[in-house]
Image (cartoon, grey):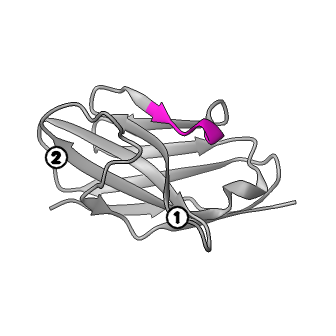
Amino acid sequence: GVQLVESGGGSVQVGGSLRLSCAASGHMYGRYYMGWFRQAPGKEREGVAVIDSGGESTYADSVKGRFTISKDNANEGVYLQMNSLKPEDTAMYYCAAEATVGRLLSPLEYPYTYWGQGTQVTVSS
């Protein structure tokens, strides 16, 4: 299987920036998707940003223009650069991955197989 380990979370003030990293061990063959999801207390988990093996990315409307997802082809890692952070971005952030045969129609809503343990992001005003 694939193991995912997140890092880079922390506490930041409104308007600040953080960069999350997700290191993957184990190889995914063929087409794959990797992304970031978040869950705030009392809320459902939501998709934030996903990138596929071809480099195509998808973002939630709430983070467009502020967050950027990227990947490292050498080690299948994925990163999330978060700028202009808001209090509503406060959540536990999880990295997820999936190997697929075809193209996902809704990559932010797909039930991914592999998940990391999460890293906390707290934005204070």
> Please, what is the three-letter code of the amino acid marked with disc 2?
Met
Disc 1: CA contacts within 10 A as few (<14), some (14-19) or many (>=20): few
At 77% from the left and 57% from the top, the residue drawn is 87
Residue 70: in magenta span: no
The residue that mark 1 highlights is 44
Figure check: 58 above or below 76:
above
Secondary structure of the residue carrying tag 2 is loop
Distance between the Cα atoms at labels 2 and 1? 28 Å
Q: Nearer the viewer, mark 2 or mark 1?
A: 1
Disc 2: CA contacts within 10 A as few (<14), some (14-19) or many (>=20): some
Q: Position of residue 64 (x, y in %)?
A: 62, 33
Magenta part of the protein: which range? 58-63
- Of the numbered discs 2 and 1, the one sitting upstream in the chain is 2
At 32% from the left and 61% from the top, the residue drawn is 4
Q: Residue furthest right?
A: 125
Figure check: 49 above or below 64:
below
Give the camera-side residue of 11 and 114. 114
Residue 75 placement, left or right of 6: left
Q: Position of residue 5 (x, y in %)?
A: 38, 63
Q: Which mark is residue 8?
A: none
Image quadrant occupied by the N terminus: bottom left
Residue 124 occupies quadrant: bottom right
Q: Position of residue 25 (x, y in %)?
A: 24, 57
Q: Which mark is residue 28?
A: 2
Residue 13 occupies quadrant: bottom right
Residue 25 placement, left or right of 18: left
